[in-house]
Image (cartoon, rainbow, N blue to C red):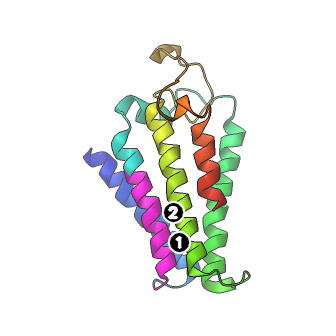
Amino acid sequence: MAKRLKRLGLATLMIAGLLFTLAGTWRDPWLWAYVSVCSAAAAYALLSIDEDLAKERFRPPNAGADRLAVRFLRLVALSHLVVGALDTGRWHLTPPVPAAVRIVALVGMATGLVMFYRAMRENRFFSAVVRIQDDRGHRVVDSGPYRVVRHPLYFGFVLAFWM
């Protein structure tokens, strides 16, 4: 548990440092809100998933068939942070967003992230790579959010990052 808390703290500091450095300011309350939502969602994920899933998720035994897609998604996620921070703090290419829209977007992002991590928590076979996990007793998951949506993780991801 202590190891996970250290990782969470380090990840939060890294993301906050990146965002605030790129934005050129530490005084933007919306960036603080963004970092807070991301950190709270990551805390929910890190503190609620079991150890087997954490090992599978962060250190899968093989690269899997979708390693290029995973790299692409990571690049898109990083560019989302970089471009957003630069635009909000330095570039100002987009017009100002009303506070009500920002609040709705943060709530939508938080909801999507919770759904994303809830799906990860429910599905003990959730992995960063596509593979049949015979070593872990792989089966179809049909409980929790999987009762309602076949791919709740993707739905949560789209909701979180569309906002």
Q: Using a 10 Å C-alpha cutoff, classify the residue at mark 1 as few (fewer than 14 neighbours), some (14 to 19) or many (20 or more).
A: few
Give the percent coordinates (x, y) of residue 161.
62, 57
Is 162 on the left-hand or right-hand side of 128? right
Is 93 on the left-hand or right-hand side of 39? right
Q: Using a 10 Å C-alpha cutoff, classify the residue at mark 2 as few (fewer than 14 neighbours), some (14 to 19) or many (20 or more).
A: some
Q: Quadrant of the N terminus?
A: top left
Give the percent coordinates (x, y) of residue 51.
35, 33
Q: Nearer the viewer, residue 78 or 35?
A: 35
Boundaries of the magenta span:
27-43
According to the image, label 2 marks what residue?
A: 107
Q: Nearer the viewer, residue 39 or 105?
A: 105
Q: Amino acid at mark 1?
A: Ile
Is 151 on the left-hand or right-hand side of 1? right
Q: Amino acid at mark 2?
A: Val
Q: Is residue 4 above or below residue 79?
A: above
Disc assigned to residue 103: 1
Q: Is residue 80 visible?
A: yes
Give the image quarter of residue 6.
bottom left
| Residue pictured at 45% horizontal, 74% vertical | 32
Q: Residue furthest left?
A: 2
Q: Main secondary structure of the magenta part?
A: helix
| Residue pictured at 60% horizontal, 34% vertical | 149
Q: Nearer the viewer, residue 56 or 143?
A: 143
Is 73 on the left-hand or right-hand side of 43? right
**Tag 2, which secondary structure?**
helix
